[in-house]
Image: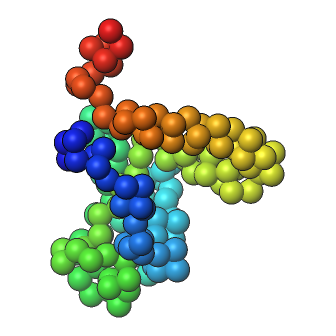
Amino acid sequence: MTCANASRLKATTWSSSRPRSNPPSSAGHADDFTVDTAGGQVTCPAGHTTRLGRPDAKGTRQAQFKKLCATCPLKHRCTRSKTGRVFSVHAKYDLLKAAREQAATDPGWQAEYRRRRPPVERAIAWLVAKGNRCVPYRGVIKNNT
């Protein structure tokens, strides 16, 4: 999308009315999988366990349920892939999971978030309203000069 096209779009085009690809009630949601980073394995909602692969350059590890999904009765709820589910685990998975749990359960964190979110959203809205959705150059240095 070019900047010229982006400036003509209305705010309503950015919101999506499509449902999530994996609704929270389905078995395919990432929270339904049990991840043991210390033991190096992942268990799916159907009870199939597979080992985590070697870390890639970014530290991400993958658990491939491909063969296990072939005969699984929950496959249609876990994945749309014909070959089976591949579950990626971030290098800092445990830290991220703890942060998400804190955000969902800690009233102090939620109060601080509610206090800071409106000014940030308002600042972004002001920038977009003045046509600053796109920048003229690639990279930070050229755009700051």
> In this picture, is 115 found above or below 87?
above
Query: What's the residue at 46%, 70% (across, down)?
Result: 29
Q: Residue at x 29, y 70 (%)?
A: 85
Residue nearest the observer in this picture, 12 or 130: 130
105 lies left or right of 53: right
Asked if 123 appears above or below 31 in the picture, the reply is: above
Quadrant in which the C terminus appears: top left
Q: Position of residue 94 (x, y in %)?
A: 55, 47
120 left or right, relative to 15: right
Look at the image and tell me whether residue 109 can be seen.
no
- Front in this rendered view, residue 3 or 20: 3
Q: Residue at x 37, y 55 (%)?
A: 10
Residue 14 % position (x, y): 38, 57
Compared across the picture, whether 144 is left or right of 138 comes to right
Q: Name the residue rendered at 27%, 87% in the picture.
A: 71
Here the colouring is rainbow
Nearest the eye: 23 or 79: 23
Relative to residue 128, is residue 22 depicted above or below? below
Among all residues in the image, which is located at the extreme bottom?
Answer: 73
Looking at the image, the residue that sits furthest to the right is 108
**Residue 35 placement (x, y as % from top left):** 49, 59
From the viewer's perspective, tell me whether residue 145 is left or right of residue 106: left
Front position in the image: 33 or 116: 116
Report whether residue 145 is seen. yes
Total tally of numbered discs in the picture:
0
